[in-house]
């Protein structure tokens, strides 16, 4: 698919991420653009909270707990960007359905999610920096 069409296909998801990004930036979060992707780090005041993620992707926007974690997780999150480019708005349904399927099989909804496995395999980033998500 041509790159502009990928952006268009994923744009509804990017729009949702944009809402979160604007809110985080308004609260003091930092942002940068890397290879056509907007990365936004949580504001310092939010870092004291215990987040269930180190980074989360919405289309072409990646939100993370810090700039350093965004940098470390970039290869993994870029795979998620590619998944949004492939699935478009359907990714908002496919991802939780994959988690639900794993949960119903007695597996871990995050670690055994098809999209997470694919992102770890392709990116080579096989861990998450958030201790709350460590596989047990």
Image (cartoon, rainbow, N blue to C red):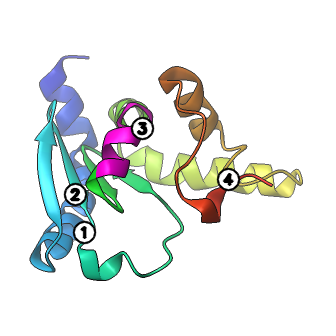
The image quarter containing residue 103 is: bottom right
Which of disc 4 and disc 3 is earlier in sequence? 3
Instruction: Report the front residue among 61 and 130.
Output: 130
Q: Nearer the viewer, mark 1 or mark 4?
A: 1
Task: Quickly name the residue at label 1.
Answer: 20
The answer to whether mark 1 and mark 2 are in CB contact below 8 A is yes
The answer to whether mark 2 and mark 4 are in CB contact below 8 A is no
Which of disc 4 and disc 1 is earlier in sequence? 1
Instruction: Report the front residue among 47 and 8.
Output: 47
Gap between marks 3 and 1 measured at Cα? 17 Å
**Residue 83 x/y as whole percent:** 42, 33
Q: Residues within 10 Å of mark 1 (few under 14, many from 20)?
A: some
Gap between marks 2 and 4 measured at Cα? 25 Å
Instruction: Tell me which residue sits at (59%, 55%) in the image.
Output: 96
Residue 74 inside the magenta-drawn segment: yes
Q: Is there any visible trace of residue 2 in the rendered image?
A: yes
Q: From which residue to which does the magenta span run?
A: 68-76
Question: In the rendered image, which quarter contains the C terminus?
Answer: bottom right
Task: Quickly name the residue at label 4.
Answer: 99
Which of disc 2 and disc 3 is earlier in sequence? 2
Gap between marks 3 and 4 measured at Cα? 15 Å
Gap between marks 1 and 4 measured at Cα? 23 Å
The image quarter containing residue 49 is: bottom left
Tell me the element at label 1: helix
Residue 130 inside the magenta-drawn segment: no
Task: Quickly name the residue at label 3.
Answer: 80
Which of disc 2 and disc 1 is earlier in sequence? 1
């Amino acid at each position: 698919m041509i790159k502009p069409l990928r952006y268009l296909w994923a744009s509804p998801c990017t729009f949702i991420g944009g809402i979160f990004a604007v809110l985080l930036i308004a609260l003091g979060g930092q942002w940068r653009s890397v290879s056509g992707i907007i990365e936004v780090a949580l504001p310092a005041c939010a870092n004291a909270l215990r987040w269930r993620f180190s980074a989360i992707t919405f289309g072409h926007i990646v939100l993370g707990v810090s700039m350093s974690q965004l940098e470390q997780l970039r290869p993994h999150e870029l795979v998620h960007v590619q998944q949004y480019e492939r699935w478009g708005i359907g990714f908002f349904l496919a991802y939780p359905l994959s988690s639900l399927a794993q949960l119903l099989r007695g597996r871990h909804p995050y670690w055994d999610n098809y999209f997470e496995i694919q992102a770890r395999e392709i990116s080579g980033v096989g861990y998450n920096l958030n201790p709350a998500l460590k596989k047990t």
